[in-house]
Image (spheres, grey):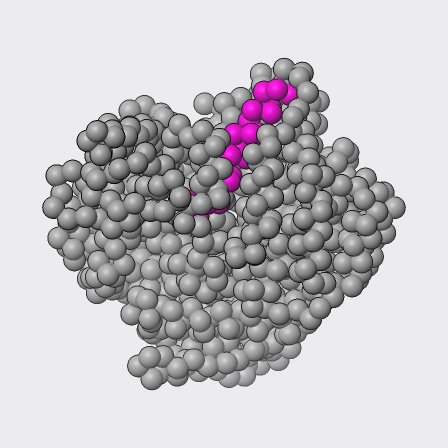
Amino acid sequence: PQTIYLKDYRQPDYWIDETHLTFELFEDHALVHSRLFIRRNGDAGLVPLVLDGQQLELVSVALGDQTLAPTDYQVDEHSLTLHPQAAEFELAITTRIEPQNNTALEGLYKSGGMFCTQCEAEGFRKITYYLDRPDVMSRFTTTILADRGSYPILLSNGNLIASGEHEGGRHWATWEDPFPKPSYLFALVAGDLCLIQDSYTTLSGRTIDLRIYVEPENREQCGHAMDSLKRSMRWDEEVYGREYDLDIFMIVAVNDFNMGAMENKGLNIFNSSCVLAHPDTATDMAFQRVESVVAHEYFHNWSGNRVTCRDWFQLSLKEGFTVFRDAEFSADMNSRTVKRIEDVTFLRANQFAEDAGPMAHPVRPESYMEISNFYTLTIYEKGAEVVRMLHTLLGAEGFRKGTDLYFERHDGQAVTCDDFIAALEDANGVDFTQFKRWYSQAGTPVLEVDGEFNASSSTYRLRCRQSCPPTPGQSEKLPFVIPLRMALLDSEGREMPLKLAGEAHARGNETVLAVTEAEQEFVFEGITEEPLPSLLRGFSAPVKLVYPYTREDRVFLAMHDPDGFNRWEAAQSLAVDVLQGLVEIHQAGRPLLLDQRLLEVWRSVLADAELDQAMVAEILRLPSEAYLIELARVADVDAIHHVREWVRRELANALAEPMWQRFDALGSAAQPWSADAASMARRSLRNTLLGYLMLTGSSAAMSACVRQFVEASNMTDRQAALVALVNSPDEHQKHAALQEFAQRWADYPLVMDQWFNIQASSPLPGGLERVQELMTHPAFNIRNPNKVRSLIGAFANNNLVNFHRKDGAGYRFLADRVIELNLMNPQIASRLVTPLTRWRKFDPARQEMMKVELARILEQDKLSPDVYEVVSKSLA
Ligand code: HT7
Ligand code: ZN
């Protein structure tokens, strides 16, 4: 495959002002008729018109009123080339496609009994020949024609302007979208769906018709998505001054979808897992995911649709910004600190690993082979961190001034990350030239800090040194702008007033230092006792912070830091330090002994009645194996797993009494379910405690767990009990629970996804064999991405001891699945292969086996560009 470079970007030779599409949908094919009103760009000469197109059967082409002969144009695997003479003309093309055979779920495809589309990034070219690039924006009118019995609902972007009956039991509908848009935002749905309807009145008094379309059996599961949508609409008005623009907003849920959801203009298409939520079938985590994905896609209406990307190198312009927006929305709707803890935990275990791996790339990449491979944690999550830093540096008001200017200046345009930054700069009179290195340099910076107290001058000197490891194609890095939010604590844990030497004004009790040099010092005055710094509060920059804290320091911060996020961080880093120390002891064959300081922190947090229960649950959770692997130079998976489980058991045995007390005080899982934050926090803490108590092996814990499994009033509690049972040594209880669960929820695919996931993630021996057997279960289907993720993905990403088993069978299994999916669904295949590409993290024997599997994939006859890019780069 070809490599595409950002430096080669140039405007298109032609624009498409209007796009008229007619879809004739049949069971064994679809005909797509397009009429395009095309205009040559500026004074481009008599250049050929090269339209993108893939896997299309070209039926006819007409330029103006003249049908072209095959000698008038050239067609190859990727394009249709025409030679128009006029500067403005009409082009009519008919293509034939087979949606029912489209297993890649890109373009027009069938999911169950319905037709649907996925056009981002380059799916539209699988529907018809087009200038399939985001800087070509066009007004779309779409007519859909299909059998009325099987497809009573016909939807596309914009407003319904006409509909009617057709011969042979068929009917049609025409939709018109008044907003020019790139082809990646086009959408079509045809199916037998039921409608859940509501309305929303905007701040300016317009009434918007809100519609969620789902399969009839899911009708009762849409209330939460609808509420989330209305809350998102209000929030975007209040926080960003952005109102919705069409009169109708639609969401459609589909079962087969490569990602979470898609922000098509006025017609969002969702993976059903991100719409459906009912307490009987969905966990609290699933409820939160629905809320945040609904918000994310809705927010794209401004950050993505009204202002879109010039080219795909600018993907983070819309994705990073929109993730930041949805994270702030969730923080406002729920606990801000807990949301931040969840996001930082995810970023550090996963995006940091990506940034240290073979596919590391900047937030604005400079090249790609297959754009689908660049919907990454770096573009989304690190991109959101970059926007968060801009928000931190400008303050909420300055940031809002900047985004107002951005939306006003670029409404209806396709723009770049530089345009975004320029709007923030111009609105605030600041210069972000150096800051922009966050867009161009890959890798996770390391920020080393140490402090020196001088009693005689009452000063405290904070020394900062930053560096960034080399990444593919970037051996040297220049210093970043790192916003360091911090405070200094006295011996009682109180924040000290901060005044920097050389500055006229004090900075209050907390400040944001801008670290801009490779080495830099900050001197605080009026410091009369040796302080303990509380650094990088709220994770104010996506860096690895290194400060020579002692374990006592960490204990102190975990108990006393007034900043909730850093309290959690101190407990986590204490646990990391303890676990890393024990891994070394275990590797040396010496007996393990638990540092009592960790136990005391856990004991004190358990006894803290003031602390939010969700925070208690977060603090009690040990750092994940994935994070410990990310932190290790050479990861000893077996030792990490063994030690982490050992520490969990030690904590459970030592703290069983206070754990039981707190567990009992939290009531029963049988009590009626409620969606409020306090109830969610209670469930989260009680289930964390249940997990610990089950490790004691006591019959009381087993009875409590079985009772919870049977009596739970909701899926959060039932599932937590099932996880604990599946991971317990009691084969009888485990099998009984799994069987009961599978029987009860056999008709609920999303619940069965959980059932697969729990078993695939269980670290008990024999994990691979279990997964292989589960692949033959009637509910499993390798064509469904949710099933692939919940069984194969969960095994390779969550079940690290089993995946990395010594004989390499886990690697072989994953490579076989990647090969199986390579042509069926290249996007899913290339995501699935990620764990193998991290081979550099492991011991030489494992490295060798992982590379053998990667090489075997590379040898396949017909390798998709998606898989080729990831595998070849990982071996380079
Ligand atoms: N903007 C959407 C991206 C997306 C996507 C990309 C590649 C292949 C399939 C896809 N489905 C959705 C989703 C979002 O970030 O909002
Ligand atoms: Zn998005």
Q: Residue at x 76, y 58 (%)?
A: 708
The answer to whether any part of residue 321 appears in the image is yes
How many labels were placed on the picture?
0
Horizontal placement of 40 versus 443: left or right? left
Q: Quadrant location of residue 665?
A: bottom right
Quarter of the image with the C terminus in it? top left
Quarter of the image with the N terminus in it? top left
The answer to whether any part of residue 751 appears in the image is no
Nearer the observer, 703 or 322: 703
Q: Residue at x 35, y 59 (%)?
A: 304
Q: Main secondary structure of the magenta part?
A: helix
Q: State yes or no: residue 320 in magenta.
A: no
Q: Residue at x 56, y 64 (%)?
A: 678
Pinpoint residue 6: horizontal percent, then vertical percent.
Answer: 29, 40
**Placement of 76 over or under 158, stated as above or below:** above
Horizontal placement of 590 versus 67: left or right? right
Horizontal placement of 54 versus 793: left or right? left
Nearer the observer, 569 or 268: 569
**Placement of 241 over or under 861, stated as above or below:** below
Q: Residue at x 25, y 33 (%)?
A: 460
Pinpoint residue 241: horizontal percent, then vertical percent.
Answer: 29, 70
Nearer the observer, 407 or 520: 520
**Range of magenta residues:** 565-586
Q: State yes or no: residue 571 in magenta.
A: yes
Pinpoint residue 382: horizontal percent, then vertical percent.
Answer: 39, 44
**Placement of 90 over or under 632, stated as above or below:** below
Residue found at the far right of this picture: 732
Pinpoint residue 868: horizontal percent, then vertical percent.
Answer: 50, 33
